[in-house]
């Protein structure tokens, strides 16, 4: 089949040109193996900031989705990268997991100005989570006024409701700080900091809050199980407004606000953090050469027509058509036409049974769609379809992709995932047969070989350099004895 260079005319070292100055912004979310809505807030802010045109690209990365924390820097097109943790407070993820997985060489509390590192030719700045920015008290206030526009210091109390945890003492600090700022503002009769998982707990609010009207603002990053289920249940809420007639302090009406993390003003907070980040350069970065070479090679193949993974790219009247390879030859009117990269992303985030797809290279991409778009949108659509696949496959073709053995991945795990270090080879293989058996990737981390890739004309030839978090989670379930027949999260 020939090498990438033979197929496309590109050297694996890239074209050796710096196209233009660039800046990349990376938003890091938690994500979920089970719930497709977990990433919605990060997507939304990425789209809002992208529309402002202040950065050449806005990229998302996740702990439990793709691109993973281990992959996301490979997907950035610039040598100037600012990373914002999309978390509501400092804690285990922002101080331990994200810096470790991204290779930042930092553990523990992040200084106010953030952390700056040079990694693989990129200048990477890592900031505090957006939730600790001083302007978040204004966002809490905005949410409170939405829930109760005529709140007053005479008869209205405010509850700032945090998650809380016993694992990290920094987690509750920002909730108390914001409560104190709003208490000092004098806009409420009283202001209380309450928590789900530590004292004082939210269920004690009737004994603590005396005002007849109470506004509850969840200090959470996104709408989810806690804000929709746990909090209403713990507080006995029946909706946005609930009146209690027999509380210890008499009749009280609770106004339940939306979480602060979904307010549009958070986009401004993110941009403030990015501009204040340590090591901010006076000029923009360059186009990252290896990344640029990978996508040039991909586009050269796309112009000829390219089948890779489960999709087919065909040139069409100066544009490109993207569709499921199994829908090849179907008339366009029989398929749903998607017109934006986000439309492709949203359609393919679930399989045909409606289940969330946290691993995009599992062989369960839904059929029945097509997208016709220009080059820039095609690139973004492919990035959504197969995060980090172009970059890693190109590196494999150039013999520069370095696999990470399972033992190394397992040793790096902390918290609830540390027990994967106890997995026997038999347990690992049992889980991998189930999870990885449905994936397009070849397990380089387990010693498998991949002499050719889709750049060489082999559609399903995609490398897997390191065990994904989905597999890590399943191995943990196996070691804990909680895993039944089949992958518990395989959908």
Image: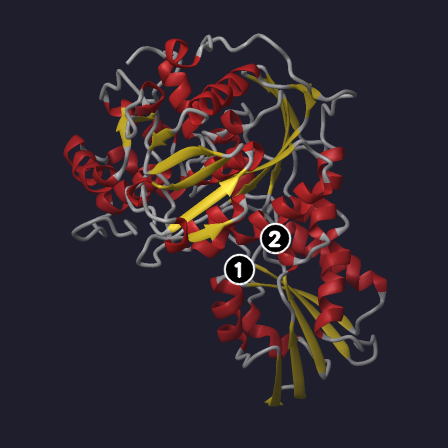
Considering the numbered disc 1 on the image, is that residue within a helix, a strand or a loop?
Answer: loop
Side (left or right) of 426 relative to 60: left
- From the image, tell me which residue sits under label 2: 172
Q: Residue at x 69, y 77 (%)?
A: 214
- Is label 2 in contact with label 1 (beta carbons under 8 Å)? yes
Q: Give percent across and percent down for residue 382.
A: 46, 36
Q: Give percent across and percent down for residue 242.
A: 61, 83
Q: Give percent across and percent down for residue 89.
A: 61, 48
Q: Is residue 239 above or below residue 474?
A: below
Q: Residue at x 67, y 31 (%)?
A: 56
Question: Can you tell which mark lies on residue 134?
Answer: none
Q: Earlier in the sequence, mark 2 or mark 1?
A: 2
- From the image, tell me which residue sits under label 1: 198
Q: Residue at x 64, y 13 (%)?
A: 18
Considering the numbered disc 2 on the image, is that residue within a helix, a strand or a loop?
Answer: loop
Give the quadrant of the N terminus: top left
Side (left or right) of 21 relative to 6: right
- Closest to the observer, 275 or 104: 275
Total labels drawn:
2
Around disc 2, counting alpha carbons within 10 Å, would you say few (fewer than 14), some (14 to 19), or many (20 or more)?
A: many
- Closest to the observer, 221 or 26: 26
Image quadrant assignment for residue 270: top right
Whether residue 96 is visible here, answered yes or no, is: no
Q: Is residue 196 above or below residue 97?
A: below
Q: Distance from label 2 to label 1 (Cα)?
A: 9 Å
Q: Residue at x 72, y 61 (%)?
A: 140
Q: Is residue 213 above or below residue 96?
A: below
Side (left or right) of 189 relative to 320: right
- Closest to the observer, 104 or 443: 443
Side (left or right) of 434 relative to 339: left
């Amino acid at each position: 089949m020939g090498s990438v260079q033979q197929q496309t005319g590109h050297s694996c070292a890239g074209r050796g040109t710096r196209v233009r100055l660039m800046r990349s912004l990376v938003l890091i979310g938690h994500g979920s193996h089970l719930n497709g809505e977990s990433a919605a807030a990060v997507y939304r802010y990425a789209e809002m900031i992208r529309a402002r045109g202040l950065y050449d690209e806005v990229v998302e990365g996740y702990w439990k989705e793709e691109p993973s924390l281990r992959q996301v820097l490979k997907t950035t097109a610039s040598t100037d990268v600012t990373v914002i943790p999309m978390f509501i407070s400092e804690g285990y993820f922002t101080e331990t997991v994200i810096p470790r997985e991204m290779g930042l060489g930092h553990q523990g509390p992040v200084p106010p100005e953030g952390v700056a590192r040079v990694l693989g030719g990129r200048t990477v700045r890592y900031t505090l989570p957006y939730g600790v920015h001083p302007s978040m008290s204004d966002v809490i206030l905005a949410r409170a006024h939405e829930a109760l526009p005529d709140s007053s210091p005479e008869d209205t109390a405010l509850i700032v409701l945090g998650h809380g945890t016993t694992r990290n003492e920094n987690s509750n600090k920002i909730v108390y700080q914001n409560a104190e700022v709003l208490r000092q503002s004098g806009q409420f009769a009283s202001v209380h900091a309450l928590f789900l998982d530590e004292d004082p707990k939210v269920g004690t609010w009737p004994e603590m809050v005396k005002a007849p009207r109470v506004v509850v603002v969840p200090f959470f990053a996104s709408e989810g199980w806690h804000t929709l289920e746990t909090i209403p249940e713990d507080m006995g809420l029946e909706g946005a407004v609930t009146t209690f007639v027999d509380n210890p302090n008499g009749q009280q009406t609770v106004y339940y606000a939306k979480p602060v993390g979904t307010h549009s003003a958070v986009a401004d907070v993110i941009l403030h953090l990015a501009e204040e980040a340590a090591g901010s350069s006076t000029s923009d970065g360059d186009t990252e050469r290896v990344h640029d070479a990978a996508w040039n090679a991909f586009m050269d193949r796309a112009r000829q027509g390219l089948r890779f993974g489960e999709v087919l790219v065909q040139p069409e009247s100066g544009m490109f058509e993207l569709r499921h390879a199994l829908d090849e030859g179907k008339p366009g009117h029989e398929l749903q036409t998607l017109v934006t990269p986000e439309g492709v992303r949203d359609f393919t985030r679930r399989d045909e049974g409606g289940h969330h797809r946290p691993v995009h290279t599992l062989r369960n991409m839904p059929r029945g769609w097509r997208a016709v778009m220009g080059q820039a949108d095609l690139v973004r659509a492919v990035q959504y379809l197969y995060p980090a696949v172009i970059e890693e496959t190109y590196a494999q073709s150039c013999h520069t992709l370095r696999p990470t053995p399972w033992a190394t991945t397992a040793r790096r795990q902390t918290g609830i995932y540390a027990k994967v270090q106890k997995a026997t080879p038999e347990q690992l293989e049992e889980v991998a047969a189930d999870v990885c058996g449905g994936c397009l990737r070849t397990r380089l981390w387990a010693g498998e070989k991949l002499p050719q890739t889709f750049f060489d004309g082999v559609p399903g030839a995609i490398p897997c350099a390191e065990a994904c978090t989905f597999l890590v989670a399943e191995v943990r379930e196996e070691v804990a004895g909680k895993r039944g027949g089949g992958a518990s999260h395989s959908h």
